Amino acid sequence: MRPHACSVSASRRRHGPIASALMALALTAGAAAASAATAAAGFDRDQALAVSQAAIGRTLGDAVLIDRQGGTRRLSDYLGKPVVVSLIFTSCAHICPATTQQLRRGVQVARQVLGADSFQVLTIGFDTDRDTPAMMADYARRQGVQEPGWDFLAADAATIDRLAAELGFQFRSTGGGFDHLIQSTIVDGNGTVYRQVYGIDFQIPHFVEPLKTLVFALEPDQSLLAELTARIRLFCTVYDPASDSYRFSYSIFVGLAVGTLMGALALYLLVGEWRRHHRLQRPAASA
């Protein structure tokens, strides 16, 4: 799937249904015009994608961030388990909110199967002129995100520039908005970029499968029982497209049982045939 790029203007007004529809059309046209303008100015989506992919395997620095209450947090505070990092700008009228809502859906599905505290989520505002802790708190409220383990954070310009570079996230001002790849980054428990997930409407398995691998990762010092349990959870937790959710599938056990039964039956028939042949050969040998 080709990654989307976002380019929208700031808008804080409220509109009725008809005005909202007109606004959506205006934003679509404005996004196309701004996209063309930024492309001419040098924003290259293919190059941005290459930079994004090159970040995989890179270990992040310990960024200093500010939470919604104005408290200081460090990126290292969230490590020890996987972390999902999403960079947005709060004045985005459509694209970023839609991305956050799809991310919310992915988080809900992932936590249903992996556990409520299995990973952390960080939404960070990169428009440092506007994305203050208060604005991040307002953005979270407007998106209805109240899930625990999901923080909305601000940072200074130097921190954002450094963190964006480490994440492989490029953004350019378009004179009222920004052009950037729509990207959520999955970071492992050691702070290393593990996977990039692209697009407003990414497919749920593209988000959950990397997290499943990280959460069910085998630890070198775990017991045999813990290792067996982790392997069973990893291979038997499957996506059901009909319900757009994950479930624990017993089909692997059914397959193993059927395979074992068929193998036992084949062995029984083979031994029976060998015995019958041996009995027929015995009189001839005695003569």
Image: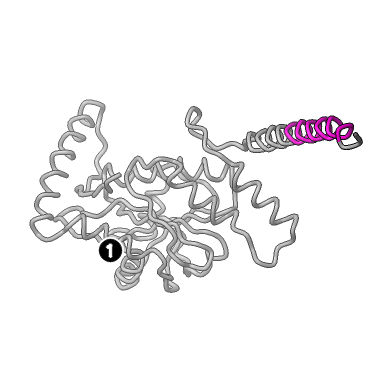
How is the protein colored in the picture?
A: one colour
Residue receiving disc 1 = 51
Q: How many marks?
A: 1
Quarter of the picture containing the N terminus is top left
**Residue 73 makes an appearance in the image:** no
Dot 1 crowding, Cα within 10 Å, few <14, some 14–19, many 20+? some
Residue occupying image coordinates x 55% and y 37% = 246
Residue occupying image coordinates x 56% and y 45% = 111
Residue occupying image coordinates x 48% and y 52% = 210
Residue occupying image coordinates x 35% and y 68% = 166
Quarter of the picture containing the C terminus is top right
**Residue at the extreme front:** 287
Residues 77 and 270: in front is 270
Residue 205: x and y, percent? 46, 42
Q: Can you tell which quarter of the image residue 153 is in?
A: bottom left
Residue 131: x and y, percent? 32, 58
As drawn, 16 above or below 194: above
**Residue at the extreme right:** 286
As drawn, 250 above or below 77: above
Identify the secondary structure beneath mark 1: helix
Residues 71 and 25: in front is 25
**Residue 208 makes an appearance in the image:** yes
Q: Is residue 203 magenta?
A: no
Residues 114 and 222: in front is 222
Residue 243: x and y, percent? 50, 29
Q: Main secondary structure of the magenta part?
A: helix
Magenta-drawn segment: 264-284
Q: Can you tell which quarter of the image residue 285 is in?
A: top right
Three-letter code, disc 1: Val
Q: Is residue 273 magenta?
A: yes
Residue 224: x and y, percent? 74, 58
